[in-house]
Image (cartoon, grey):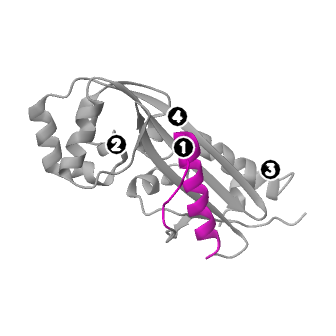
Amino acid sequence: MQKTSCQLILGSASPRRKELLERTFLPFKIITSDAPELSEKTNPAEYVEDLALLKAKDVYNKVDSHSIVLGSDTVVSSEGRILEKPKDTNHAREMLQSLSGKSHEVFTGVCLIGQGRQSLFSVKTTVNFSKIPSDLLELYLETGDSLDKAGAYGIQGMGLCFIDSIDGSYSNVVGLPLSHTLREIEKLAKEINPGIKNWRSCFE
């Protein structure tokens, strides 16, 4: 059987997702979605899956049929509220104050679409915050790091100072549950090329 080659496409402009996906040793290109990020879902797992699917579909319509597109979305969920990126510094301050000294969940939805196949899933990680000292909070806000991150913090940066512990995938909090995603990419590649010994060789 002739091998079918695949082009992996990351449908995200996030530098964090790019860095994470590079660690899979798979070649990929980046094509961002132009679709409005709107969902009527209120359950956080369903919400991120809905947006991941929306982004993946939008990018898939722009590429050729040999592509596998990865769409993703991440939110923080706290006390029944879905927290996305803050609107400004004051909004970021309010978010972080609401998370201070409590536990919350980070949900990332991932959608893979390619060659008549689709994989859609979400992963949850519980993050336990310590009480954030007011001086540390203001110093963090001055960096601007909070403004482009769901929940107004990044675990991979200075926001790590707020975190006592996590239960679940670290990379999920960064923006892509890497181990789970890699398994799903492998599964898709093998479905497209049944019986292949080296599934990584499918990717250009």
For the residue marked with disc 2, what is the amino acid?
A: Gly
Q: Which mark is residue 178?
A: 1
For mark 2, what is the residue? Answer: 151
Question: Nearer the observer, disc 1 or disc 2?
Answer: 2
Q: Position of residue 43 (x, y in %)?
A: 54, 40
Taking the spot 17% from the left edge, 42% from the top edge, the residue there is: 140
Q: Residues within 10 Å of mark 1 (few under 14, many from 20)?
A: some
Total numbered labels: 4
How far apart are labels 1 and 4 at the CA level? 13 Å
How far apart are labels 3 and 4 at the CA level? 32 Å
How far apart are labels 4 and 2 at the CA level? 14 Å
| SS state under label 2 | helix
For the residue marked with disc 4, what is the amino acid?
A: Lys
| Mark positioned earlier in the residue sequence (4 or 2) | 4
Taking the spot 59% from the left edge, 42% from the top edge, the residue there is: 122
Label the magenta part by its dominant secondary structure.
helix
- Residues shaded magenta: 36-62
Relative placement, left or right, of 30 versus 128 is right
For the residue marked with disc 1, what is the amino acid?
A: Leu
Asked whether residue 50 is drawn in magenta, I would say yes
Taking the spot 54% from the left edge, 43% from the top edge, the residue there is: 178
Q: Is label 3 in contact with label 1 (beta carbons under 8 Å)?
A: no
For mark 3, what is the residue? Answer: 197
Who is closer to the viewer here, 139 or 98? 98
For the residue marked with disc 3, what is the amino acid?
A: Lys
Taking the spot 44% from the left edge, 33% from the top edge, the residue there is: 80
